[in-house]
Image (cartoon, rainbow, N blue to C red):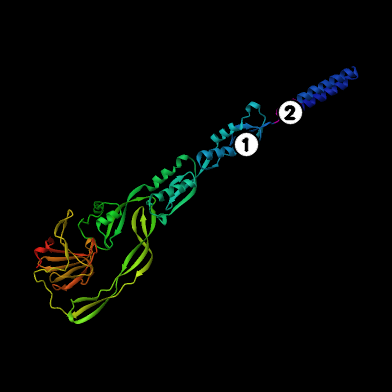
Amino acid sequence: MCYILIKKAIINFMEETIMSSLEKVQSIDMIKYFRLFVAIIVVTAVFYLGFEISQTPNAYSVLLGEEQVGIIVEEVLAEDLLKEAKLCIEEDLGGTIDICSELTVEPIRASQKEIIAKEELIFKLKNQISYDINAYSIKVDGVEQAVLINNNDAQAVLEKIKAKYIEEGIKAELISFVEDVKVEKKLVKSLDDIISVDEGVTLLTKSSEAQKIYTIEEGDSLWGVSERYNLTVEDILKANPDLEEEGILQIGQEISLNIPKPILSVMTKEEFKYTEPIEKPVRYEKDDTQYKTYIKVVEPGEEGEKEITAYKVRINGYEEGTEIISEKVLKEPKESVVIVGTKTPPPKSATGSFRMPTSGRLTSTFGQRWGRFHAGIDLAGPVGTPIYAADGGTVVEAGWHGGYGYLVRINHGNGFETYYAHLSKVYVSVGQKVAKGEQIAAMGSTGNSTGSHLHFEIRLNGEAKNPYNYLK
């Protein structure tokens, strides 16, 4: 507005001067007034031109929001310098950002001293722009657990966690997380919300104690379960007050295990192969001339063999079981033929004396053995060797019994019981009455056994006695 008023004033002054000069031409020499007129015109033009120049914009003010950051010569340079400032910040962070500040440019008149170099403007932009960081969130079962600066770091955390549970020298064909794991992009305001790769690994593998219910399987013992889950027997007993260290575990029994449980659990599957016997079929032929207790193998037959390919499944390094992939028969089994009597035997009752339950070589006596108490005697022989009742009585247990493997227990009355352990076959059932010398089972190596043998015990009122003090 001031500029327009001054411009009008100059024009008016020039018009008045010219009109005044023309009026005086009649009374003064024409040349004298003409020179005066020209001089006035020149002075006025110079003044007007200088004023015009002083008001023309020659630079641009760079604004972030309403705050001026600096003054530059070229308008287009502002956006380029903002991009350079953004790249510098991203290089320092190791990630990408979204700029929140609004950049504007306004033309202004500025002195040379007010104009700044582009390096200085980049520095100012770096320190004054506001931005959000494009981070990456690791979510476990839908819950955010860690935030990393970029996707590469997030993936590195997950790969390092997987690597913790791959044993040296073992190739895991399949490795995955038990939980649902997702990596999602997320905007954060500050680096304080972001952690490093090592911090992410530590956080997601931090363990808290969790309870696992374990179901007892054939062949299990407290020692074996503790070894499998890297616990002590004392740990298991503490979690299960109703258990006893020398107690008997039943197949299907459930026990509690307190094992470490991290935020993120890793499942590995390792392929392996092993062979397993194929049970031979048995054909029984009846003999009406023999008692029902009579059993004679006329054709021993032969077990077959198969190759099994399976996965060994581990969770956080703890073995959880196997998954069978395929089976291949290596050798077909051969049928066994057994003659069995059909005549009803005489009444069965205790005689008060005990006979040797089988033929075999004595390999372990009653008493202390390997620093522990051995409650019976061990008689070694081939798998399938007949086992006979040491005296008449009633079968009170017939089946799997923890470390005993397959077990037959007979009550003979008067507080006496006999135990027949590690059997391969059991021919009697609970409640059945047996006579002294009647075959009740076949020798084997089931349970905690180092080879085919019979573990034989005589107990009186629950207390183990030396069998040789009673055998006749």
Question: Does any portion of residue 76 appear in the rendered image?
Answer: yes
User: Magenta segment: does it hold 157?
Assistant: no
Quadrant of residue 118 within the rendered picture: top right
**Residue tagged 1:** 78
User: In terms of depth relative to the viewer, which is nearer, 309 or 32?
Assistant: 309
Q: Label 2 sits on what residue type?
A: Glu
- Return the mark for residue 425: none
Q: Secondary structure at mark 2?
A: helix
Highlighted range, magenta: 49-56
- Image position of 4 with respect to 383: above or below: above
Q: Secondary structure at mark 1?
A: helix
In the rendered structure, the answer to whether residue 417 lies left or right of residue 216 reads left
**Residue tagged 2:** 52
Question: Does any portion of residue 130 appear in the rendered image?
Answer: no
Quadrant of residue 32 within the rendered picture: top right
Tell me the mark number nearer the camera, choosing from 1 and 2. Answer: 1
Q: Are marks 1 and 2 in contact (CB under 8 Å)?
A: no
